Image: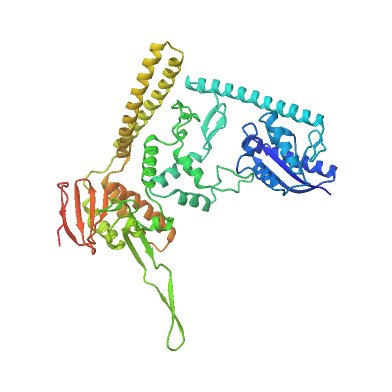
Amino acid sequence: MKSAILYLRVSSAEQIKGYGPDRQKNLGREYAVRMGWAIECEIADEGRSAFHGANRMEGAALHDFELEARNGLHRGKVLIVENIDRLSRQGAKAAAQLIWALNEHGVDVATYHDGYIYKAGNNGDMMELFSVIIKAQLAHEESATKSRRTRASWDKRHADIANGSKETMAGRAPAWLTIRDGEYRAASGRAEILNEIYDLYINGIGIYKIVQTLNARREPPWPIRKKDGAGGWYMAYVHRLLTNRAVLGEYITLEGQCLAADYFPQVITAEKFARAQAVRGKKAKTGGRYFNRASNLLSGIVFCQECQGTACYEHKGSNSFTTYKGKDGRLRHYRRKTYERLRCDNFRRKHGCDNASLLDYRVVERTILDELLPRLVNRPAVDGALLSLREGVAERVRLKDADQKRLDNIIDAIGDGGVKALIERAATLEAALDEHTKNIDDLRAQLAIEEAKPSTFDDTALIEGLRNELDSPDEEVRSVTRGRVNMTLRRLLHRIEITPCDTFIVWPDKDTWWRFDENGVLLDGEQIWHASSKPLNAA
């Protein structure tokens, strides 16, 4: 009985949902039974286009099969496919070369759609050659026609959306929206979950922990990788939710053009989105294991004074034991001493820094929480009116940006068909606009971050309210609380520096500093501080 491999391919998510693989699988199995072949295995490429050759690129099942065939692993077998266009839609030459290459390595290719077998060895004839060329070219022309029609259809949709049409559907709705009566609307409960994700992230809870939280409470996943939805939430998807400007209502093309600022219903405020991006910028500077990040309240704000590199946090000896045999021959087990330390990471890695200072992390943490936080309250609490103004400013800035981008696109389109002088003038203006836009964007990003920050009073009150949970015996409570406090401390403190003299300097801002010894005793400092602050007394 001849051994066979069944190949399945669908090019889009819609085909996958339409059970295209199941149809191909059932028909392929029936064909193998009729031919008296035993199916050795089934290989599949889901969501890979044959028109662009994605199913033959590295990582695809067909790519791996070709390599195996080239190494003689499938000699004497038959590859079963629905028809030639499942293998390739890149034209007659590409399809013919693929089939003939498989034949040369001893593999027959059978298409059950028309019952034709392209045999290995010298069993082929001239009609087989014509058959491959004609079928492959027809498949390529069909795909090319579909591609042109699809591109024209999307160009028309994009033009309508840019002109303010709300009736034009952009296709599949974002996961937190649904389409009812020809309109996009927030799906039941999903806007609340999306806001919860943003709130958790802004409060210092990392993406990994957010995913764990959603999966632990069995929140039905939006990204369904399997038909039964068993895939759960995963980090890459939550990251996309935190960076997708469609939550603001904007329609962004794959090329990055903003066609409309209010196309979708807005489910996340501009102020909240800006704060999330500010948190992303801060988190990008840190790394390490999640356990260390959750334990270290000072992650991302401690640096070496000598090389300006980041400080590493070491937590050693936790839950570890040492064993030795006594004179009486009995084994004794002792818990090792647990210690947490801060030191220059470049020195630790012997990477061009001589700062060998090693500080007790708990001393630095206690100094920050007990000595400095009470003196950082130098601004009044933020009231609801100010928060509303912040949100309004951020929203209008966003709308202005979106309109400017739309205007730029229109100018570009006019310039492409204008006279030479107009084109040159447009090019000069575009260069100037690009420079202005870059400068404005940089300033606006800084403004959005500052405007989105809670007041110092709010931040210190938050930390005081969480003090009892920082060392909670419940690991879940402890890690979440420490993540929130870490993000708050990043707003309150400019930086902490480890000096070569076993001391550390705390900079609440760029103009104020205090130096402490390794035991947390104040040595000296420079105060340019709010009048209501109580001065620190040197030891």
Where 522 sits versus 90, above or below? below
For the residue pair 445 and 274, the one nearer the viewer reads as: 445
How does the figure colour the protein chain or chains?
rainbow
**Which residue is found at the position 61% from the left and 39% from the top?**
57
Q: Position of residue 188 (x, y in %)?
A: 53, 38
**Which residue is found at the position 81% from the left and 38% from the top?**
122
Q: Position of residue 446 (x, y in %)?
A: 31, 37
Q: Position of residue 117 (x, y in %)?
A: 80, 37
**Which residue is found at the position 38% from the left and 50% from the top?**
286
Examine the rendering and report whether any part of residue 342 can be seen.
Answer: yes
Examine the rendering and report whether any part of residue 47 can be seen.
Answer: no
The C terminus lies in quadrant: bottom left
Where 415 sits versus 516, above or below? above
Q: Going by the image, does 487 lie left or right of 36?
A: left
Quarter of the image where one finds residue 29: top right
For the residue pair 186 and 483, the one nearer the viewer reads as: 483
Quarter of the image where one finds residue 416: top left
Q: What count of labels does the image hold?
A: 0
Q: Position of residue 428 (x, y in %)?
A: 35, 19
Residue sitting at the far front: 122
